[in-house]
Image: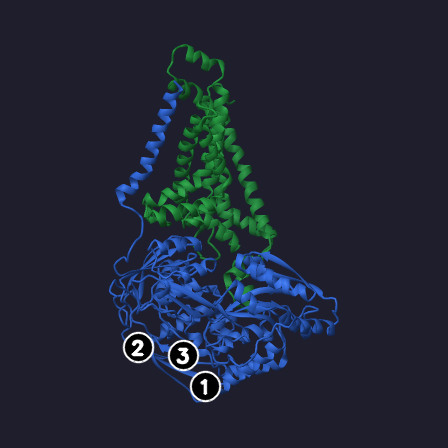
Chain colours: A blue, B green
C-alpha cells in the first residue's frame, strides 16, 4: 500500500519536472545566442545613477551621457580633443579667452536647434547650488564662476553669448587643461525647457543631441538606446544598443559565453583561463588604463610624516613579484603618479627597487630600528586582500607589523578623507587626459581629503610648480614641469607606488571595429558594428 | 476572531513606529556619509556643506525624523539622495518582481519539500529516504550563491536550456533558475520537517483507525496525516516567504533580477538614507502582514486553534 503513495509522489515529481521544462520547450531554448541583428549588447555592473550630465559623477552614467548628449568638444579614442557641438574655436593671445563657434542646424531630440544660450545655461546650471551638482569644479577656472556659485553674482561673468552660435568663455587665469574639462560629462549641453519641464525627473527623460536616444530604461535591469535620426555626425552602424545591468562578474562571464553579450571585461579571477583559451585569443584586446594603483600613506601622521619611513615602505615591498604572481601581465610597475601615455610621464625614471636592507637602514635612521606598527585600510575585495596580504608579508620582513582593515567603500572614503588611516589601498582614474589630473588634485596641499590629496602631502615647492604648470600652455614646457613635479613627489614617497593597471577585454567574433577608448566617456559607438562576415 | 484581528492590526502601529525609529537612529550611528556617496571622487568642502544644507542633513536629528515621519504619513517616502528618484515609485517598480520570485521560490520549495519529505517518511531507511535526506542535507548546507552559479554554468552555459540571467521582460524562462536557487534551501528544510513530523503522525491512533476503516493508504497519508503535519511547515513557509518578499540579495545579484533586495543593498552601500528608510519600512509592513496571515491560516488548517 505504501508503494501506491510512493508511485503517486514519483508521478508528482515527474509532472513537476515536465512543468519546469514546458516553458523551455514552448519558448525555445535559452542557450547560445548569435548576434541580434544590429543590436549591440553591452553591460554595466550597476544601474546608472543618473542620465543628467550635471549630476553624473561615475563612469557608468558618464559613459551613457556621452551617447545621449554632446559637448563643445570631445575626446577621440586616444586622448585628442575633437570638435563636437563647436565646429571650431579660437584661443586669445593671453590664453584666457576661448571663443567657440557652434555648428548650425544641430537639434536636440525635442526638435529645437542648439544655440550658444544653451551652452551658457548648461554650464551655469552645474554651478548653481540648487542643481546639487558636485562637478562645479569643472567650471571653476571660468571668471566669475565662484561668485555665481556662492550667490555673490546672478550670472557667470566669464560666459558670454556673442551671437546665436558663438559663445565666449573667459578664464580667471590661463589654464592649460581647460579644453579637457569641457570634454567631461558635466559640460554636456542640455535644453533649458526640458529641465524646466521635468525638474528632478529630467534624468528619466534625457534630451540631448548625441547619436543615441533613450528608448527604454527598466531600472536595475536594462536600458535600450536607438539611433538619433537627426544626429549631426556620421550615422552609427548599429541600430540599437542594449545595456544590461549585471552586478556579478561571474554572471557577466556566463552571459558572454552564452553569446548574450557582445563584449566583456575579463575578470581577474578568470584571467588565465581566458588568455589560454585559443577560441578567444583573436578577439582579446588589452590597454593600459590612465589609472594609478597605490597605497596612500598619510604624510601628516607620525611616523609617516618622516620621508625616510615612507621611502622605507617603498623599498620594503617587492612590487614586481606581487605583480608577477597576483596580476601577471596586467600592469606596468609605477614609477610616479602620471601613467604612461600622458604628457609628463617619464619612462626613464627608475621605480623603487626591492631593497629590504635599505628599508631597514632608513627605518633605523628614522628612529625605528625595531620596526613599527601600522594599519592599511582597504575596501572589501578578494583581489585587494591577496595583494595586501603579500604587502603585509614583505613589510613584516623589515619589521613593520601591518594590520589590514577592511571597510565598505562609504566608510573607507570617510575615514581616509578625515585622515584616520595610516595607509590605504586606492586607485586614481583620469577624469581628463592631462598630467595635471594626476598632480593637482592628488598632491596640491589645497586638495587635502576629498579634493583628491588623500595622502595629505604638502610641499610648498610642489604647490608652486603645480600652480605654474597649470597655466603654461606650451606643451613641451608643461610636460617638463609635470615630470619635475612627479619626480619630486616620487622621491619623497608620498605613496607606496604599485602599478598602472592594464585592462583586458574580449569581444564576440561578430563584433567589428571594436576599439577600447582611454577615456570612459569617449566612445559614442559610431564605428563599432555587428556582422557575421569575416 | 474579529476582535483578535483588530487587536493584531493595532499592534502593527507601534511595531512600525519602532522600526522607523530604530532604522533612523542606526543610520546615523553607523559610519559613512551619504553626501560623500553623492559627490564622487573629487569635491571641495563647500560642495559638501551646501549639499548637506540642501538635504537638511545638518538639522538636529529629531527635526529630521519628524520631517521624515510627516512625509511618510502623507504617503511620501522622499527621493533617493543618489538617483533623485521617488523612493515609493522605485519600490512599487521592484516589489512585483520580488513578489514574482518569492512566489515561484515558495512554490518550488513547497512542492519539492513536501513530496521529498513524504516519500522519505512513508518508506523510512529505504533508498528513497536516503536519497531524499541527502538532498535535504545538501540543500541546507550549500550556499545559495554556489547553487545559483552551478545552475547558471550547467543549465544555461553548458546545456543551453535557459538564459543565464536577467528579467527578460517577465518571460517565465528567466524565472526558473532564480526560483530554484532561492527555493532550494526552503525545500530542504520543508523536506526534513515533513519527514520528521510525518513519522510521528503516522504512528498516531487516528491514522491506525483510518487504516482500520479500510481507507486507501494514499488518502490516509494525504488527507489525515498531511494536514496535521502542515502547521509547523506553514510556520517555516511564512517566515521564509516574509524574508523572500523583503528581497533576496544574493539570488537577485547573481541573476541580475531587478528586485527589492538589490535595491536596498545598493542604498545601504551608498548610505542613501531615504531609500534605506523607505525600503526597511516597506519590508516591515510586508513581514508583519505575512506573519498575521500565517497566524490566521493556522485556524483554517487546524480547527482546534481558535483566536480570542
State the residue in front, A418 or B216. Answer: B216
Q: Nearer the viewer, residue A284 or B104?
A: A284
Front: mark 2 or 3: 2
Which residue, given by chain and number where applicable, does mark 3 sit on? Answer: A160
Specify the label residue A95 is tagged with: 1
Q: Quadrant of residue B151?
A: top left
Mark 2 on the same chain as mark 1: yes
Q: Quadrant of residue B109?
A: top left
Tell me the quarter of the picture where residue A230 sits: bottom left
Label 1: how many residues lie within 10 Å, few (<14), some (14-19) or many (20+)?
A: some
Quadrant including the N terminus of chain A: top left
Q: Is residue B75 above or below residue A283?
A: above
User: On what subunit does the disc labeled 2 rest?
Assistant: A
Residue A157, above or below A304: below
- Most extreme residue toward the bottom is A93
In percent of the image, x 25 and y 59: which residue is there?
A37
Label 1, secondary structure: give it.
Answer: loop
Task: Work out whether residue A70 can be spotted.
Answer: yes
Category of crowding for the residue at label 3, using alpha-carbon neighbours closer than 10 angstroms: few (below 14), some (14–19), many (at least 20): some
Residue with the mark numbered 2: A103
Amino acid at each position: 500500500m505504501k508503494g501506491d503513495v510512493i508511485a503517486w509522489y514519483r508521478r508528482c515529481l515527474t509532472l513537476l519536472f515536465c512543468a519546469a521544462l514546458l516553458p523551455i520547450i514552448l519558448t525555445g531554448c535559452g542557450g547560445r545566442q548569435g548576434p541580434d541583428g544590429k543590436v549591440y549588447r553591452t553591460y554595466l555592473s550597476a544601474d546608472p545613477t543618473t542620465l543628467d550630465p550635471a549630476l553624473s559623477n561615475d563612469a557608468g552614467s558618464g559613459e551613457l551621457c556621452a551617447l545621449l548628449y554632446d559637448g563643445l568638444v570631445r575626446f577621440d579614442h586616444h586622448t585628442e580633443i575633437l570638435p563636437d557641438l563647436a565646429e571650431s574655436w579660437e584661443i586669445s593671445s593671453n590664453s584666457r579667452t576661448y571663443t567657440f563657434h557652434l555648428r548650425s542646424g544641430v537639434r536636440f531630440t525635442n526638435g529645437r536647434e542648439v544655440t550658444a544660450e544653451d551652452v551658457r545655461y548648461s554650464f551655469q546650471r552645474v554651478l548653481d547650488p540648487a542643481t546639487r551638482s558636485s562637478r562645479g569644479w569643472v567650471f571653476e577656472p571660468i571668471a566669475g564662476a565662484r561668485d555665481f556659485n556662492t550667490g555673490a553674482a546672478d550670472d557667470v561673468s566669464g560666459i558670454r553669448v556673442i551671437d546665436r552660435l558663438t559663445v565666449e568663455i573667459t578664464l580667471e587665469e590661463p589654464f592649460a587643461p581647460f579644453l579637457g574639462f569641457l570634454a567631461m560629462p558635466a559640460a554636456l549641453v542640455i535644453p533649458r525647457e526640458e529641465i524646466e519641464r521635468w525638474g528632478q525627473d529630467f534624468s528619466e527623460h534625457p534630451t540631448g543631441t548625441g547619436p543615441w536616444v533613450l528608448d527604454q530604461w527598466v531600472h536595475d535591469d536594462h536600458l535600450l538606446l536607438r539611433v538619433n535620426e537627426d544626429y549631426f555626425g556620421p550615422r552609427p552602424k548599429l541600430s540599437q544598443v542594449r545595456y544590461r545591468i549585471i552586478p556579478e562578474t561571474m554572471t557577466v562571464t556566463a552571459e558572454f559565453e552564452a553569446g548574450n553579450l557582445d563584449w566583456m571585461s575579463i575578470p581577474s579571477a578568470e584571467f588565465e583561463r581566458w588568455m589560454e583559451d585559443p577560441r578567444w585569443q583573436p578577439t582579446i584586446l588589452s590597454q593600459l588604463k590612465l589609472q594609478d594603483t597605490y597605497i596612500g600613506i598619510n604624510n601628516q601622521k607620525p611616523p609617516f610624516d618622516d620621508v625616510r619611513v615612507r621611502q622605507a615602505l617603498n623599498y620594503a615591498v617587492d612590487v614586481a613579484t606581487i605583480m608577477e604572481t597576483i596580476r601577471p601581465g596586467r600592469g606596468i610597475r609605477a614609477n610616479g603618479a602620471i601613467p604612461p601615455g600622458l604628457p609628463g610621464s617619464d619612462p626613464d625614471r627608475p621605480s623603487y627597487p626591492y631593497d629590504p636592507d635599505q628599508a631597514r637602514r632608513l627605518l633605523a635612521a628614522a628612529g625605528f630600528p625595531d620596526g613599527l606598527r601600522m594599519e592599511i585600510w582597504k575596501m572589501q575585495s578578494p583581489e585587494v586582500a591577496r595583494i595586501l596580504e603579500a604587502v603585509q608579508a614583505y613589510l613584516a620582513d623589515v619589521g613593520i607589523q601591518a594590520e589590514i582593515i577592511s571597510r565598505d567603500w562609504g566608510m573607507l572614503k570617510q575615514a581616509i578623507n578625515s585622515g584616520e588611516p595610516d595607509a590605504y589601498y586606492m586607485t586614481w582614474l583620469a577624469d581628463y587626459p592631462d598630467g595635471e589630473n594626476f598632480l593637482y588634485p592628488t598632491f596640491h596641499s589645497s586638495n587635502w581629503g576629498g579634493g583628491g590629496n588623500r595622502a595629505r602631502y604638502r610641499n610648498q615647492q610642489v604647490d608652486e610648480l603645480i600652480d605654474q604648470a597649470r597655466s603654461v600652455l606650451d606643451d613641451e614646457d608643461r610636460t617638463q614641469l609635470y615630470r619635475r613635479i612627479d619626480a619630486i613627489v616620487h622621491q619623497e614617497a608620498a605613496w607606496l607606488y604599485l602599478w598602472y593597471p592594464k585592462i583586458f577585454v574580449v569581444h564576440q567574433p561578430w563584433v567589428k571595429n571594436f576599439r577600447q577608448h582611454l577615456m570612459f566617456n569617449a566612445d559614442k559607438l559610431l564605428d563599432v558594428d555587428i556582422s557575421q562576415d569575416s | 476572531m474579529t476582535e483578535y484581528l483588530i487587536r493584531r492590526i493595532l499592534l502593527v502601529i507601534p511595531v512600525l513606529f519602532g522600526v522607523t525609529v530604530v532604522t533612523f537612529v542606526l543610520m546615523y550611528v553607523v559610519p559613512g556619509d551619504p553626501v560623500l556617496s553623492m559627490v564622487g571622487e573629487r569635491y571641495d568642502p563647500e560642495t559638501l556643506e551646501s549639499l548637506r544644507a540642501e538635504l537638511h542633513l545638518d538639522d538636529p536629528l529629531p527635526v529630521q525624523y519628524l520631517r521624515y515621519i510627516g512625509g511618510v504619513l502623507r504617503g511620501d517616502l522622499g527621493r533617493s539622495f543618489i538617483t533623485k528618484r521617488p523612493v515609493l515609485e522605485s519600490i512599487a517598480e521592484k516589489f512585483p518582481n520580488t513578489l514574482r520570485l518569492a512566489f515561484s521560490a515558495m512554490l518550488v520549495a513547497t512542492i519539492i519539500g513536501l513530496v521529498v519529505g513524504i516519500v522519505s517518511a512513508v518508506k523510512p531507511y529505504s533508498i528513497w529516504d536516503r536519497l531524499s535526506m541527502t538532498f535535504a542535507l545538501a540543500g541546507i548546507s550549500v550556499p545559495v550563491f554556489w547553487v545559483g552559479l552551478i545552475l547558471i554554468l550547467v543549465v544555461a552555459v553548458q546545456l543551453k536550456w535557459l538564459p543565464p540571467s536577467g528579467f527578460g521582460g517577465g518571460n517565465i524562462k528567466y524565472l526558473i533558475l532564480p526560483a530554484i536557487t532561492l527555493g532550494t534551501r526552503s525545500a530542504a528544510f520543508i523536506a526534513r520537517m515533513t519527514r520528521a513530523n510525518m513519522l510521528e503522525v503516522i504512528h498516531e491512533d487516528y491514522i491506525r483507525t483510518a487504516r482500520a476503516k479500510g481507507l486507501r493508504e494514499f488518502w490516509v497519508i494525504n488527507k489525515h496525516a498531511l494536514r496535521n503535519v502542515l502547521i509547523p511547515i506553514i510556520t517555516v513557509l511564512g517566515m521564509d516567504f516574509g524574508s523572500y518578499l523583503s528581497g533576496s540579495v544574493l539570488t537577485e545579484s547573481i541573476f541580475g533580477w531587478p528586485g527589492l533586495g538589490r535595491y536596498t543593498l545598493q542604498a545601504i552601500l551608498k548610505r542613501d538614507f531615504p531609500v534605506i528608510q523607505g525600503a526597511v519600512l516597506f519590508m516591515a509592513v510586508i513581514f508583519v502582514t505575512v506573519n498575521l496571515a500565517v497566524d490566521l491560516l493556522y485556524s483554517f488548517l487546524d480547527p482546534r486553534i481558535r483566536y480570542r
